[in-house]
Amino acid sequence: MSVVKISPVPLDQAPEVTEFLTRLDLGSLRQDEISAFRGRNDSWAGVTSTGFPVFVKRVGGEPSTVRPRVDRIKAMGELLNTHPVVNAPRFLGADEESGLVAFALLQHAQSGSDLGGDGFTWELAHSAGFQVGTLHTLQLPQAVAEDTSEPPLPPLKALVALPLEAYAVASGAELEAWAILHNDPVVVAEIRKLAAWEKDSTPVLVHGDLRLDQFLHHHGKLHLVDWEEARRADAARDVGAFVGEWLYRGVLGMASHEETVSDREVVANGARRFEMLRPNIEAFWSGYLEARPAARADRDLATRAAAFAGWHMFDRLLAAGYERARLTPLERAAAGVGRKVLINAADFTATLGIGG
Ligand SMILES: Nc1ncnc2c1ncn2[C@@H]1O[C@H](COP(=O)(O)OP(=O)(O)O)[C@@H](O)[C@H]1O
Ligand SMILES: [Mg+2]
């Protein structure tokens, strides 16, 4: 399976896309030849009239957050355009007013989440770790260095109660996911502790939203996309997100007849399946430490990363609930696993593949 494509917003309903591409001297896209990718934001992909393969996305959401997100994308794009190790699709331009950003399109790329357990080879996972480790050694671009906004997750305020506006638009499954958090003061306290712990760490340049679908495999190389949450923050955020992605897959891939298995079986199957996925994390971690040997001096990095991986289960749970009526039993099981890892992070580093 290749990257999931969906129908793009028609270009005549978004004339700013054509204006933007024309201003960048890239030609224009034709309505019958474009596609879009699944993501939070609208996107348009295709080959322009001048023969240029482009990917355009519109940074959407809360208006006050659009400009800083575009600024981060721009700063990271300019930094990585000339970087020899951290691969990203070539950044072509940004427009703060419309929220549009353009990149070279990696045609027929496969995303890390499509590659899955088998397709994500040792070499790719090692490369992912090496690139992220290298990223964490880079000097911060000015716009990111000056940005003191909090990374959006974990949402510390919403941990106690959901704001009314968010409650009103939440789906049944999202409310279920929030209720799991709100009814668990131990988890809430652990998440708060993690946030405080992060504040004491030495911050580095992080990607900030390192899910598997942000990796694109193209012509044998792994590229990293979606830099809108790049920040000066704890390295454990990125390491923990990568670990958490595989952990979540381990839990979700556990059983075929999920309604009939017992909790005990769910956990046993999940552990077994995770054993098969763990080499991906081990390869990532060895690549990471090769690129950033100084990380060994940060003695708590692996423990904080494990805690972030635990948090990541809740993050995935909230995302999974989007526009759905109910969570599945396996999704609820993922929250249970996340809880354990969050609370006992130090005991889980070796099991998670970031012990050595
Ligand atoms: N330059 C690119 N070439 C090909 N596909 C891309 C490119 N950039 C992003 N994509 C695909 O589009 C998806 C959405 O892009 P992304 O920047 O992650 O936006 P969002 O903020 O909507 O998640 C990515 O997960 C990836 O599959
Ligand atoms: Mg994305």
Image (cartoon, rainbow, N blue to C red):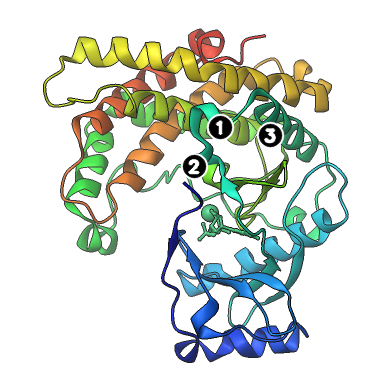
Amino acid type, callout 3 = Ala
Gap between marks 3 and 1, in whole Å?
13 Å
**Residue designated by label 3:** 128
**In the rendered image, which quarter is residue 210 located in?**
top right
Residue at image point 54% right, 78% down:
33
Query: Which callout, 3 or 1, points at the residue further toward the start of the chain?
Result: 1
**Left of 337 or right of it: where is 277?**
right
* The CB of the residue at mark 2 lies under 8 Å from ligand 1: no
Q: Residues within 10 Å of mark 2 (few under 14, many from 20)?
A: some
Taking the image as drawn, is residue 315 in sight? yes
Query: Which callout, 1 or 2, points at the residue further toward the start of the chain?
Result: 2
Q: Residue 245: x percent and y percent? A: 48, 33
Gap between marks 1 and 2, in whole Å?
8 Å
**Left of 328 or right of it: where is 285?**
right
**Residue designated by label 1:** 119
**Residue designated by label 2:** 114
Amino acid type, callout 1 = Gly
Residue at image point 29% right, 14% down:
267
Q: Please tell me the numbered disc located at residue 289.
A: none
Callout 3–callout 1 Cβ contact below 8 Å: no
